[in-house]
Image (cartoon, rainbow, N blue to C red):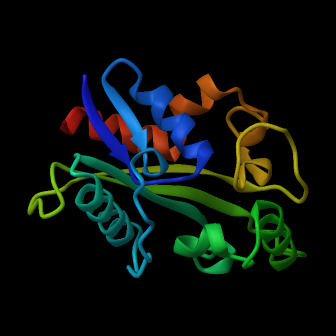
């Protein structure tokens, strides 16, 4: 099995990627390899994923996978978007609080998670593989469920009549934006 560094220190993402890539690749984290984070200076999810993948590959000497993902809310003109993880300047709970506050009284609660995954063979790879995924739903007025991370507790999946945080990991790992992008990446690899 090929060893690949995942350009993340987010335990939720590391767990999801390991579950989705099980049996195909051995995933190591940035922490495992002593890789320092890089500033996400891109203006798009794809740009940020490329920046992170190149950084992780350069510092580790390994092929790298990076993702950049976030929540895009129609009524908020795409916010929080690429700033999803740092929307409030605080943690996941504070991000959700800010989102719900910004949506008070708003009827259009359509939203989608977007994920760009990038794979580079080496830091200067001129042909990174880019895979994309979208997961459409709605924003709830209050939290529901205990699973997941980020905005999962307020992201409602109408087809399943549940929030993302009410889904078990095996179901989420087949439907989510990250799962769809990963399926696309595995086909391309």
Q: In the rendered image, which quarter contains the N terminus? A: top left
Depth check: give the residue in front, 134 or 91.
Answer: 91
Residue 121 appears in the rendering:
yes
Considering every residue shown, the one lying at the far left of the view is: 126
User: Residue 35, located in which quarter of the rendered image?
Assistant: bottom left
In the image, what residue occupies the spot 62% across and 76% down? 79
Q: Quadrant of the C terminus?
A: top left
Residue 34: give x, y in percent of width and height. 42, 54
In the image, residue 76 sits, relative to residue 156, either above or below, namely below
In percent of width and height, residue 142 lies at 91, 56
Query: Of all residues shown, which one is farthest toward the top?
Result: 23
- Residue at the farthest front position: 34
Q: Write down the quadrant of residue 81 in the picture.
A: bottom right
Residue under the point 45% across and 55% down:
115
Could you say which is closer to the camera, residue 127 or residue 140? 127
**Picture layout, residue 80 above or below residue 155:** below
Residue 59 located left or right of residue 9: left
């Amino acid at each position: 099995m090929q060893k690949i560094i995942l350009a993340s220190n987010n335990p939720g993402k590391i767990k999801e990627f390991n579950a989705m890539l099980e049996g195909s690749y051995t995933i190591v984290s940035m922490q495992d390899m002593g890789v320092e984070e890089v500033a996400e200076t891109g203006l798009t999810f794809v740009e940020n994923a490329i920046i992170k993948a190149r950084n992780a590959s350069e510092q580790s000497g390994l092929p790298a996978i990076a993702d950049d993902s976030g929540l895009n809310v129609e009524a908020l003109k795409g916010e929080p978007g690429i700033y999803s993880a740092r929307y409030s300047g605080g943690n996941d709970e504070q991000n959700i609080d800010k989102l719900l506050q910004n949506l008070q009284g708003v009827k259009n609660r359509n939203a989608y998670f977007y994920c760009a995954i990038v794979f580079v063979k080496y830091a200067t790879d001129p042909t990174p593989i880019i895979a994309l995924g979208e997961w459409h739903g709605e924003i709830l007025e209050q939290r529901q469920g205990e699973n997941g991370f980020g905005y999962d507790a307020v992201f409602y999946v109408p087809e399943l009549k549940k929030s993302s945080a009410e889904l078990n990991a095996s179901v989420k790992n087949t439907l989510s934006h990250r799962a769809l992008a990963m399926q696309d990446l595995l086909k391309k690899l």
